[in-house]
Amino acid sequence: MVECLQYLEEFNYISILVRLSLAVLLGGIVGAERGAKRQIAGIRTFALVCLGAALAMVTNEYLGVRDGTIVDPSRMAAQVISGVGFLGVGTIIVTGKNQVKGLTTAASLWAVATLGIAVGAGFIYGAVIGFIFIMLSIKVLQKASRYQENHNRILEVYMELNPEVGMTYVTDYIHNKEFVIRSMQRSCQNTFSADDVAVTMEVDLKNKQNHSHILAELEQIKGLDYIEEIH
């Protein structure tokens, strides 16, 4: 195993083929997970980013071998890391409900780019370990992140409700629970019902509570036709 890794660190046609193939494979696996979540960037995007980063490093190494001169190995890597940031920004979306989506995908693209750099540089061991931790961060930490979001002290919601009846009952509920309304503003979002208004509200629950239970109680309020938590 060690000899195999050492061989792949050498610059030859076989190691180049294995490096680029591995970059496509690892990047594609990460992209498949994002694609399953119906994100903008999927298998092809992640595979291409990882392949491009790996190819940049292989090309950087090739220039040094061909010319027989000392080439700064971090030059192309630095350009890849800064350049992929612009691609990541394109996956971040702010919805009409002020929800920010795509941050995990953007971070994953950046991480996959560094993964490609490691593969392209021949650092296969580090690339594989990095790949494992990337997948663990996406899969395992997702559950921890959801739990933290669902038990946060601050609850931010988007609501579509009757401006008189619904709003009265909602504010009464909040005051009876001894919660505090930190901010409230009317949204320009179109509502399902012409008689409703769209409102975003930030509520301080005073302590960490299960948001699902609170949302379930709010859904039963008369005049409140739609409610959704903003993450």
Image (tube, grey):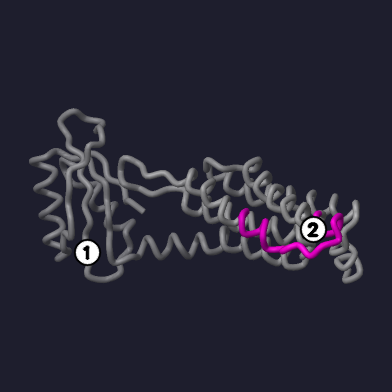
- Mark 1: few/some/many CA within 10 Å (<14, 14-19, 20+): some
Q: Quadrant of residue 145?
A: bottom left
Count of numbered badges drawn on the protein: 2
Nearest to the observer: residue 30 or residue 175: 30
State which region is magenta: 63-80
Residue type at the position of mark 2: Glu
Q: Quadrant of residue 35?
A: top right
Residue 34 seen from this side: yes
Q: Position of residue 127 (x, y in %)?
A: 72, 63
The residue where tag 1 is placed is 204
What residue is shown at x 79% (from left), y 58% (from top)?
61
Mark 1 or 2, nearer chain start: 2
What residue is shown at x 23% (from left), y 48% (from top)?
200
User: Mark 1 against mark 2, which lies toward the viewer?
Assistant: 2
Residue type at the position of mark 1: Asp
Residue 108 seen from this side: no
On whether residue 147 falls in the magenta region, the answer is no
Q: Is residue 98 above or below residue 122?
A: above
The residue where tag 2 is placed is 61
